[in-house]
Image: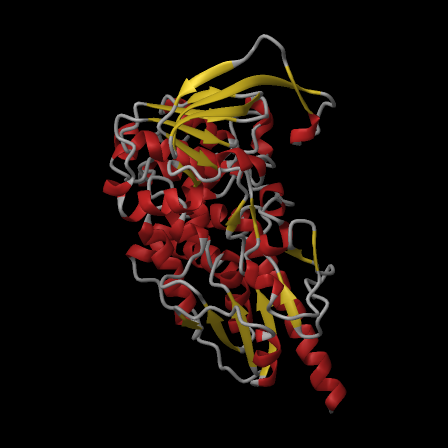
């Protein structure tokens, strides 16, 4: 079972679902079939191993369940709130043939909170005997890599350009979906491993990677994420057209400055961040919030849970639609014009595959436009090292071992995959740590 979404909590930016009670946790865990080759564990990119921690909960070993989650996924508490389980572990749940899937994120949240509330012993500190590794960016992928390297006894230093760690989990995901204390708990566990985080320390100067390697770091891992949003040309130079990154940051830390109360807001985009922006605007008192997307409702890249949340909050969906023009009073937009569309080729979700449908034109009175149509790596990627190869929209090119075109330099997370889930970023960080370890060991053996 899942607790219902509490709209009152969303308006006050508190966690939208209450935790399962102990009785509910026991009932839910007892539904587990204890599969031998558990498909739920195979469905987790980060190897959190839900089959194991559910089994431990089922037999009342709650601390053991908390340890399993924390050992396998350094962002286990964060993922309990935001992981798209319906696409991963719950999708693979064997009991689906008979009943609804096990509420895996609810059980994961219970176990993680149990460990936090009962002062689970700190993770083992790295002996720091195998050399230094630099990690650029303290988002999910950088955290996953740093934690895995610390377990292998490396000295890990993370260079973070912001004053806080966590990347998108800290700056952009609203607190009704991800409470701040969940992030803080996972970061506390990371620090207990002896990982050092250098805050307000961007690595963005010309050939900075070469400098790090010359300073004695055995390897470098780039996990700078995506920081530069795409924008529509027609919306440039308008004061009340923004993108989701500054809007969500303002909502999270200075809600009184969001400026949407009793206003009409249009969000352009259909992914997770578009939904977050739309729901946050509504929670901040917007009169009407429209979500305009090229995709059909059942094609939106946002997760079903997120779409359900938007529907509960009365977001007005304008799907299979695109913006065609604006009306304005000086530098302020006061209206959007749009038209409904259809796909020329089914399953190809790109703007050049959309065809306008005559006679479906519409106009909306709008006070604020929020763009959420994609993001690309920041400009720093182009200057970190002249030998660093990129592709597509500027993402870093790597091989199957997350090695870049520069020896000793690895990369993963959104700056490589172009934007995926937090759990995928953690998984890539862990896999990259294995490759870094193999690289350093091979070099050490060759020198010997």
Left or right side of 46 for 60: left
Q: Quadrant of residue 178?
A: top left
Nearest the viewer among 237 and 50 is 237
Q: Residue at x 54, y 78 (%)?
A: 154
Q: Quadrant of the N terminus?
A: top left
- State the quadrant of the C terminus: bottom right
Residue 58 in the image: above or below residue 342:
below
Measured as percent of width and height from the top left, residue 274 is found at 47, 35
In the foreground, 11 or 263 = 263
Q: Is residue 291 above or below residue 394?
A: above
Q: Position of residue 46 (x, y in %)?
A: 57, 53
Across and down, in percent, residue 242 comes to: 42, 40
Note whether residue 338 is visible.
yes
Which quadrant of the structure image shows residue 12? top left
Residue 173 placement, left or right of 235: left
Where, by quadrant of the figure, is residue 190 drawn?
Answer: bottom left
């Amino acid at each position: 079972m899942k607790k219902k979404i509490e709209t009152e909590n969303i308006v006050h930016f508190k966690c939208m679902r209450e935790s399962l009670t102990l009785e509910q946790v026991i009932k839910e865990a007892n539904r587990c079939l204890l599969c031998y080759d558990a498909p739920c564990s195979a469905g987790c990119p980060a190897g959190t191993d839900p089959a194991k921690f559910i089994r431990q909960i089922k037999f009342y070993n709650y601390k053991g369940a908390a340890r399993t989650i924390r050992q396998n996924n350094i962002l286990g508490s964060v993922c309990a709130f935001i992981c798209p389980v319906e696409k991963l572990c719950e999708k693979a749940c064997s009991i689906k043939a008979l009943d609804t899937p096990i509420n895996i994120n609810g059980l994961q949240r219970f176990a993680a909170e149990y460990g936090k509330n009962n002062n689970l012993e700190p993770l083992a500190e790295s002996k720091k005997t195998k050399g230094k590794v630099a990690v650029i960016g303290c988002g999910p992928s950088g955290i996953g890599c740093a934690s895995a390297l610390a377990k292998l006894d490396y000295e890990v230093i993370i260079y973070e350009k912001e004053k806080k760690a966590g990347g998108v989990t800290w700056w952009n995901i609203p607190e009704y979906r991800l409470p701040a204390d969940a992030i803080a708990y996972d970061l506390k566990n990371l620090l207990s491993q002896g990982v050092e985080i250098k805050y307000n320390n961007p690595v963005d100067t010309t050939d900075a990677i070469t400098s790090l390697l010359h300073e004695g770091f055995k390897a470098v891992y780039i996990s700078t994420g995506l920081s530069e949003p795409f924008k529509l040309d027609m919306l440039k130079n308008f004061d009340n057209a923004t993108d989701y990154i500054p809007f969500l940051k303002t909502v999270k830390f200075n809600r009184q400055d969001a400026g949407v109360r009793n206003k009409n807001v249009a969000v352009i985009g259909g992914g997770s961040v578009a939904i977050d922006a739309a729901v946050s605007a509504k929670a901040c008192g917007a009169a009407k919030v429209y979500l305009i997307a090229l995709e059909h409702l059942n094609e939106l890249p946002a997760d079903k849970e997120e779409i359900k949340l938007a529907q509960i909050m009365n977001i007005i969906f304008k799907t299979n639609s695109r913006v065609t023009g604006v009306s304005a009073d000086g530098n302020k937009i006061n209206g959007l014009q749009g038209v409904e569309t259809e796909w020329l080729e089914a399953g190809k979700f790109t703007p050049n595959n959309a065809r306008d449908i005559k006679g479906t034109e519409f106009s909306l009175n709008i006070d604020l436009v929020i763009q959420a149509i994609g993001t690309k790596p920041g400009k720093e990627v182009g200057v970190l090292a002249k030998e660093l190869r990129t592709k597509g929209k500027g993402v870093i090119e790597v091989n199957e071992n997350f090695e870049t075109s520069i020896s000793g330099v690895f990369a993963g997370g959104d700056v490589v995959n172009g934007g995926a889930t937090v759990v995928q970023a953690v998984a890539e960080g862990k896999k990259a740590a294995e490759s870094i370890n193999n690289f350093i060991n091979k070099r050490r053996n060759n020198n010997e």
